[in-house]
Structures are given as structure tokens and as C-alpha cells.
Amino acid sequence: MARKHRSESRLREEGVPFIRHLPRIETRDEVKLRTKEEIAYRSLALTVVTAKAVGMRQPSVENAVKQLGLAPHFSRRERGFILDPTPPHQDVVHFSWSGEAAWPLFWALGFVDRLDRPITVVGERDLPHAVHAVQDHGAQPYIDSARLRALDEVLDQIDLIYRYHWAVREAWLRGHKMPAGLDPGVVEERHHALNWLAVPKDEQPDEWPDWDEVDTST
């Protein structure tokens, strides 16, 4: 319960509404983190997906997928988008948000120092350049240089974003202004990514949710 209380104290300081009976999340005794390699490949897949959505040309996308060995690491929906040279506009818009999901994974891998409040979007327009930078060295050096954060750090962020997401959804349902400047798109994508990171200890990898199936209910 200490984690829940810390999150509520922060929300109170920021002026974000919350309800005390929103339950706690899973504890360190119940979940574990996915492997560093899996998280790294997921972050790269999301980066390439976003890069395509914001303008990377199809030949460059295909080259990045090949050089980084990403083909097995896309979700079903992502794979369809990546392979389609002229995807529907609604898919382009949808996947342009994937950079917001990549950001907490960069944080979990130690490449980002901190996760700021979810009030502004990251610089998606810079992602094509980031893809090219990783391509120059390959996926393995990227994986090797990652330093996975402790489970408790990740659980702190999962608990906090869970409560941010409740506040955003409650405001939307009631037709209210988003509280404390929260960006609902950033909140949703961050919640998705952070929930994907932690998996039940008592389940096998083939039982873990696919990226397209991650639960972000509040």
C-alpha cells in the first residue's frame, strides 16, 4: 500500500483528482520484468513504426527493419502497417503515437533519466534520425549498452500512470477539462508500455499478453 499512498500524495500535490478505493497494482512478489533484450527490441520496433508514421520513406523503413532484425518483433497490427506502402490515414495517425510508448521503454532501459509528467509529446520528428543512428551500429550494441531499471522503480511508474489514466478517463467521461494539463494520448500510450513491461511470475512467456492485447483498464 505504500506505493499507492506515494502516488496519491504526488497526485494531490499536482492537483490531479483520484479515488482512494482504486486498488493497488501487483507487487514485486507477483510480477517480474520482461528481459532486457525483449524490451530493447520492442522499443526499436516502436521507434521504426513511429518513424514511418511521421514520414520515413518505405525503402528506408524496410532497410531499418532488415538491418536491425525487427521483423519478428512487430505486433500483428504493427506488421500490417510496416508492410503497407500506402497505409490508411487513420493508421498513420494511430501509429504516430507509438513514440509515446517507446519513451517509457527507453527509460526502463536506462537511456532516459526520468519520466516527466505526461503533459507534452516527445519529439517524434526526430525519430527517423534516431533510427538511422541505431542502424549505424546495429541492434546488439544498443541492447548491450542498456541498463535495466529495478523492478520497484518500474512498479512505481506503473502505479502512478494507472492513477493518471483514471483521472484522464474520468474527466473525459464527465466532459471536464483535462486535470493539471495532462495529455490523454501521452497518458494512454505510457500506461500501455509500462503495463507491458511487467508480467506475472507464475506464467510462461507464451501466456504473456502480446503488445496489441495489453490491458490498460482503470
Image (tube, rainbow, N blue to C red):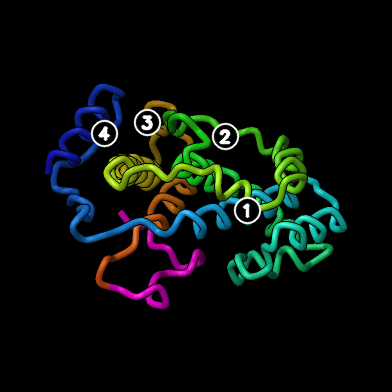
* Image marks 2 and 1: residues in contact by CB distance under 8 Å: no
First of labels 2, 4 by sequence position: 4
Camera-side mark, 2 or 3: 2
Disc 1 secondary structure class: helix
Camera-side mark, 1 or 4: 1
Which residue carries the number 3 mark?
Answer: 179
In the rendered image, the vertical position of residue 91 relative to residue 143, given as above or below:
below
Camera-side mark, 2 or 4: 2
Measured in 3D between alpha carbons, the distance from the residue under mark 4 to the one under mark 3, in whole angstroms, is: 7 Å
| Residue sitting at x 31%, y 40% | 153
Would residue 103 be found to the left or right of residue 127 on screen? left
Name the one closer to the observer, 187 or 105.
105
Which residue carries the number 4 mark?
Answer: 17
Measured in 3D between alpha carbons, the distance from the residue under mark 2 to the one under mark 3, in whole angstroms, is: 16 Å
Disc 3 secondary structure class: helix
Measured in 3D between alpha carbons, the distance from the residue under mark 2 to the one under mark 4, in whole angstroms, is: 22 Å
Name the quadrant of the C terminus: bottom left
Camera-side mark, 3 or 1: 1
Name the quadrant of the N terminus: top left
Measured in 3D between alpha carbons, the distance from the residue under mark 2 to the one under mark 1, in whole angstroms, is: 28 Å
Mark 1 residue type: Gln
- Mark 3: few, some, or many residues within 10 Å (few <14, many ≥20)? some
| Residue sitting at x 77%, y 45% | 136
Which residue carries the number 1 mark?
Answer: 140
User: Is-magenta flag for residue 100?
Assistant: no
First of labels 4, 3 by sequence position: 4
First of labels 1, 4 by sequence position: 4
